[in-house]
Amino acid sequence: MYKLGSEIVKRAYNFNAGPSALPEIVLQQAQEELLNFRDTGMSVMELSHRSKEFETIHNEAQSLLKELLNIPENYEILFLQGGASLQFTMVPMNFLNGNEIGNYVLTGVWSEKALKEAKILGRATTVAASTKEENYSRIPNLSELIVSPEDAYLHITSNNTIYGTQWKDFPETKDSMLIADMSSDILSKPLPIERFAMIYAGAQKNLGPSGVTVVIVRKDLLEKVSSSSIPTVLRYDTHAINNSLYNTPPTFSIYMLNKVLHWVKDLGGVKEIATANEIKASLLYDVIDQSNGFYRGHAEKDSRSLMNVTFQLPTNELDKKFLAEAKEAGFIGLNGHRSVGGCRASLYNAVPYEACKALQQFMIMFKEENQTN
Amino acid sequence: MYKLGSEIVKRAYNFNAGPSALPEIVLQQAQEELLNFRDTGMSVMELSHRSKEFETIHNEAQSLLKELLNIPENYEILFLQGGASLQFTMVPMNFLNGNEIGNYVLTGVWSEKALKEAKILGRATTVAASTKEENYSRIPNLSELIVSPEDAYLHITSNNTIYGTQWKDFPETKDSMLIADMSSDILSKPLPIERFAMIYAGAQKNLGPSGVTVVIVRKDLLEKVSSSSIPTVLRYDTHAINNSLYNTPPTFSIYMLNKVLHWVKDLGGVKEIATANEIKASLLYDVIDQSNGFYRGHAEKDSRSLMNVTFQLPTNELDKKFLAEAKEAGFIGLNGHRSVGGCRASLYNAVPYEACKALQQFMIMFKEENQTN
């Protein structure tokens, strides 16, 4: 709830899969200074990307991310455009030379797309493991992965929004050549950054609004970018050399990202966030587990995502009824992805405990009213 | 000037080259609804890009652009990411097959970059004309262009921000295969759209904040995109088929674009805007022409840009003094690009007449105080 002039406005219970909820206080701050950023007489959107004011925002966002995720000095932080979809092609374009092999773990549609783009480029690829035959209801065990010291990298999708699965531990690879699409769970918990060669994430779930893509890349990888036929704007080294100012960046998205990072820091950092995320998710998983099969989770228990809780009801009709009544009650974005159906509640960092609690209560009430035995 | 609570805030005289000034009323509207878009209880940034609310914004922006620029039905309007820099590679990647030749007119650094990216891809290119030896102080005459019916396309940069030059008329090409980077003057005047195969523009000058790139492309071109080795997200047909929702779009930038388009419509359309732009630019060009050489325009008169007025003073010291005093007086963004030096005033659509008038007065006063004879 917040006050706009004399009006009290209730915030929606926003469970969107992304773009998704942003911290209310971040939006309030952005609103306050929207026409006059730090007494410049300009909106932050009207600043030159080469001005001192924007440089401060940009560098602040980089150092905050370093601090919050404990990122060592030998990593570059880049702010790019194009979302994870552009990273799917930039990764093999930059890091697979000659006959080098990209090794992919398939845990859902997004991993499949990442693999597909490496193939479109004509690069050599292999599949370390896939749980497709189980409708991606789990993350493979680390022991199931077929990896080789010859792999140029091992690519994973750390959280799978559609299926509601999430990696709990990360594989060790030779020379730590693990590359992860963390679009939907970056900043939700502490990370062993040293195991990763690169992490990339579209901002629109845990980091801010859509329009900016965060890349954390180990510096030695940039030397691998050798082919002279890579378009300048698609080379990671171009953006590293230019501190992500090779071309005009999405300045407002980076400004919002910076504010969200400040908010995480003010809350106490990613450890605190991780605890809050566990509590929020368990509110819903507890209802599922205690429902005697009324709510059926899509993900296997030890692969469950703290970000996306996916479940179905006993019949399609009950799914529809649940979604209709939830919508009526003010819950936004609970429809499951069409490829698995059912329901999905996305509980990203900025979704408040109160919204999860309200959904828990709604789920309990709906079960009581609709269970047949 | 606007009122924030009890505070009166003066808007800066913003002559930034981009990102640049936005209409004050657009910013006010955005501010008002930043936490609660149309009674959803959510910020527009928190909406799903697949929600009805966002779809409305997205489709409204497309139809407004069609209406304002009088774009025929056989063109697609796409909202992409990555700025003109990504278009530099997407154009040859999509439209030069086999030995087809891309023909480029060089009128500045941005045209050079566009050509360079075609070459990096290993595509065949040629140069229709270049004014580089004249430090890009003019646009070539149409009669100077070396074009051939064999060209796959002719590429131009319609306005050159660094040098302050602008195309006044556009070449006729076989099958109207003209492709233009209009990042810095789209929507500043009516356009003969039928002559163009494609127009692209980063939004951050006349269209809105940075983060979204507008592409207007004739539908028959999409059939030329045949190579199976083009990354999915870099294919124009991918975005056309998916109405620019193949992946998560920069929703807030598109929302702002839509508001800016409404603002142009409310002002009476691009003809009205063009008249206003002529009046604004002539305020400054008149001072230059009547200064007896105190202010020296970089661009030749018949190539002068209405968007970017570039000029130098008699000495480097006077340039510096002018820029320092102008900054002191509240004029933002007047430094010329480092490659030509001197001063530059960018007068995009949203720069108000009052700001240009104030700069004119300042220039007159500065000349009176500093001319030696």
Image: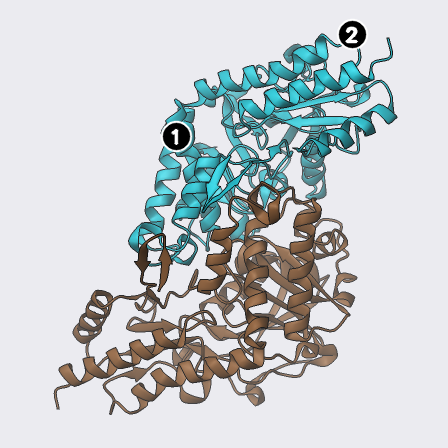
Chain colours: A cyan, B brown
* Left or right for B161, reference B119: left
Q: Position of residue B190 (x, y in %)?
A: 60, 80
- Locate residue B192, reporting x and y percent: 65, 80
Which residue is the site of mark 1? A66
Return the x and y of residue B168 as percentages of the image width and height: 53, 84
Q: Residue at x 30, y 73 (%)?
A: B343
From this view, report whether residue A196 is shown above or below residue B240. above
Cα gap from disc 2 to disc 1, whole angstroms:
44 Å
| Mark 1 burial class by Cα count in 10 Å: few <14, some 14-19, many 20+ | some
In this rendered view, identify the residue nearer to me: B242 or B2: B2
Instruction: Output the chain of dot 1.
Output: A
Q: Position of residue A37 (x, y in %)?
A: 35, 51
The answer to whether marks 2 and 1 sit on the same chain is yes
Amino acid beneath label 2: Asn
Residue A145 seen in the figure: yes
Outermost residue to the left: B372
Residue B157 seen: no
Q: Secondary structure at mark 2?
A: loop
Say the numbered circle drawn on residue A282: none
Circle number at residue A292: 2
| Element type where label 1 sits in the image | helix
In the rendered image, which quarter is residue A40 located in? bottom left
Judging from the image, mark 2 belongs to the subunit labelled A
For the residue pair A51 and A141, the one nearer the viewer reads as A51
Amino acid type at circle 1 is Lys
Ranked by sequence position, the earlier of labels 2 and 1 is: 1
Q: How many marks?
A: 2
Circles 2 and 1: CB distance less than 8 Å? Answer: no
Instruction: Report the residue at 31% width, 59% height from top.
Output: B8
